[in-house]
Image (cartoon, rainbow, N blue to C red):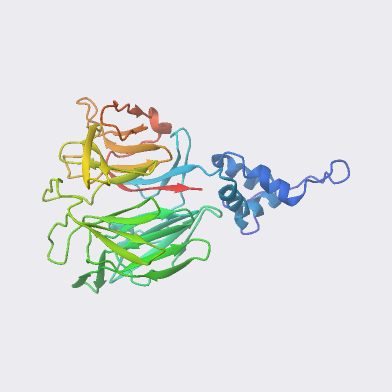
C-alpha cells in the first residue's frame, strides 16, 4: 500500500475514533515518551493507527527522545549481490523490513555500480558514480523515503567513514574528474543528520583511498588504504575534534598481509576496543594502543580469505561483533551466514560465536556488497 503525504493509506479513508468525550487525551509530551520506548520494529504499525501518530514519526521527535533517554537500538542495513533493495534487520536478526528502492531508472550507472554506505542518526547515506559525477542519496528512517543530497563538499568514493551518534565523519577517498581523471584526496568532512549539512575538516597528513574508519575513544581513526601511487599504506591517522588536528600512527598495520585483491581493512569497535578481521587467516585480532600492536584472539567463522575480504561484513553491533559472509562449513558453500560474539580483549578467553538461525527466512546472497549499522 502506498502512503500519501497526509499519512492516509491509498484506497482507505481513515476514521480516527473520537474518544474525547469519554477518555481524556494524553499530553503530547507523554505520548512521545511512551512511544519512544516501543521496539523500533513496531513503529510501522503506528503509521496505520491514526494520522496523529503517523505525524509524530515523521516529525522525528520520537527519535530525538530515544537518543536523549538512551533507549536507542542498533539496526543492520545491508545489500547483497543481486539485490535491488536494501534490507533492514533488527539486532537479533529476528525481524526485517525491506527499504524502498532508490527512485532511479534501471539503466542508471549509479544503480549498477559499486557504492559506499554509512549511517548518521536516522539517515542511511549511499554514494556512488552516476555518469561522470558522484551522486549521494539519503534514506530517512522517519519517513521511509529516499532523498537526493546533500552532496559532500568534495564528492568522493572509496573513502573511510565512522559514525558518532547523529553525525558521521568521512576522510580520504578518490575524487573523479569525468571518465578519465582521478585524484586520491586527504580531505575530511563531517555530516550532521540534524541539519543535513556537511562541514569541512582539516585534511589528513596523507591522501589515501580504499581506507577504513572507526570512532574510538572520542577520536576518528582512519587506517590503511592506498596512496596516489597505488602503494599499500601500513600507517593510520586519528583526528581530534577538540584540537582540530590529525596525528599520524606509524606501522599500525605493519603485520597485515596484503593480497592483490585486498579489501579495505575490516575493523570494528566494541566497548572501546578496536578489533580487526585479518583476512589472510580468518583471524580476529584486537589492537593494543600502548604497544601499537595486534593480538590474535581466534578464528572467525566466515570465508574472508578467498576474496581478500570483499563480500564480508564486519561491524560492531552494540556490545557485540557482527560478521556476515560465506560460511566456512564445507557443506554450506554459497550461503550467507550471520554470527555474533561478545569479544574480550584477553587472548586467554575463548571466543564464542553465535549463529543467527534462519535470518528471518530472507534469502540473501553470501556476498555482501554494502553493510552499515544504524543506532536509532
- Tell which of 87 and 32 is nearer to you: 32
Asked which quadrant contains residue 127, the reply is: bottom left
The residue lying toward the viewer, choosing from 253 and 64, is 253
Where's residue 232, x and y in %? 14, 57
Q: Is residue 102 left or right of residue 274?
A: right
Q: How many marks?
A: 0
- Determine whether 260 is above or below 184 in the image: above
Give how far across and how far down residue 351 sits, in percent: 30, 28
Is 13 placed left or right of 235 in the picture?
right
Q: Position of residue 123 (x, y in %)?
A: 47, 56
Q: Does any portion of residue 8 appear in the rendered image?
A: no
249 displayed left or right of 232: right
Which residue is pictured at 56% across the width and 45% down the height? 70
Task: Examine the rendering and report whether any part of residue 325 can be seen.
Answer: yes
**For residue 26, above or below residue 208:** above
Q: Could you tell me which residue is drawn at 31 percent across and 38 percent down?
A: 324
Q: Residue 281 is drawn in which quadrant?
A: top left
In the figure, is residue 282 to the left or right of 96?
A: left
Q: Residue sitting at 67 percent across and 42 percent down?
A: 34
What residue is at 49 percent from the left and 65 percent from the top? Answer: 196
The residue positioned farthest toward the right in the image shown: 21
Percent position of residue 43, x then y? 59, 43
The furthest residue to the front: 290
Which of the 4 image quadrants contains residue 296?
Answer: top left
Amino acid at each position: 500500500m502506498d502512503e500519501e503525504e497526509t499519512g492516509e493509506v491509498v484506497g482507505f479513508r481513515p476514521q480516527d475514533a473520537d474518544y474525547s468525550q469519554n477518555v481524556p487525551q494524553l499530553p503530547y509530551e507523554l505520548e512521545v515518551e511512551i512511544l519512544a520506548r516501543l521496539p523500533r520494529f513496531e513503529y510501522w504499525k503506528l503509521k496505520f493507527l491514526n494520522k496523529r501518530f503517523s505525524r509524530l514519526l515523521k516529525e522525528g521527535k520520537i527519535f530525538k527522545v530515544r537518543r536523549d533517554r538512551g533507549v536507542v537500538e542498533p539496526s543492520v542495513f545491508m545489500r547483497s549481490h543481486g539485490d535491488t533493495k536494501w534490507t533492514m534487520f533488527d539486532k537479533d536478526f529476528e525481524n526485517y523490513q525491506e527499504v524502498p528502492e532508490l527512485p532511479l531508472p534501471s539503466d542508471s550507472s549509479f544503480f549498477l555500480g559499486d557504492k559506499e554506505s554509512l549511517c548518521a542518526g536516522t539517515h542511511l547515506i549511499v554514494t556512488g558514480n552516476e555518469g561522470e559525477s558522484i551522486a549521494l542519496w539519503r534514506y530517512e528512517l522517519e519517513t521511509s523515503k529516499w532523498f537526493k543530497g546533500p552532496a559532500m563538499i568534495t564528492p568522493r568514493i572509496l573513502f573511510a567513514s565512522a559514525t558518532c551518534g547523529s553525525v558521521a565523519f568521512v576522510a580520504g577517498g578518490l575524487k573523479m574528474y569525468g571518465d578519465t581523471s582521478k585524484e586520491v584526496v586527504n580531505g575530511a568532512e563531517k555530516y550532521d543528520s540534524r541539519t543535513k549539512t556537511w562541514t569541512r575538516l582539516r585534511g589528513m597528513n596523507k591522501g589515501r583511498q580504499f581506507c577504513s574508519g572507526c570512532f574510538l575513544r572520542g577520536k576518528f581513526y582512519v587506517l590503511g588504504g592506498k596512496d596516489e601511487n597505488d602503494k599499500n599504506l601500513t600507517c593510520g591517522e586519528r583526528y581530534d575534534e577538540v584540537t582540530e588536528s590529525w596525528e599520524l600512527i606509524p606501522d599500525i598495520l605493519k603485520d597485515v598481509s596484503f593480497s592483490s585483491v585486498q579489501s579495505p581493512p575490516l575493523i570494528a569497535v566494541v566497548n572501546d576496543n578496536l578489533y580487526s578481521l585479518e583476512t589472510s587467516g580468518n583471524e580476529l585480532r584486537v589492537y593494543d594502543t600502548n604497544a601499537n600492536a595486534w593480538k590474535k584472539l581466534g578464528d572467525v567463522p566466515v570465508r574472508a580469505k578467498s576474496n581478500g575480504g570483499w563480500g564480508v561484513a564486519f561491524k560492531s553491533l552494540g556490545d557485540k561483533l557482527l560478521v556476515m559472509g560465506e560460511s566456512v562449513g564445507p557443506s554450506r558453500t554459497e550461503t550467507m551466514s550471520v554470527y555474533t560474539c561478545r569479544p574480550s580483549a584477553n587472548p586467554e578467553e575463548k571466543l564464542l560465536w553465535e549463529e543467527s538461525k534462519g535470518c528471518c527466512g530472507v534469502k540473501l546472497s553470501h556476498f555482501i556488497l554494502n553493510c552499515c549499522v544504524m543506532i536509532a
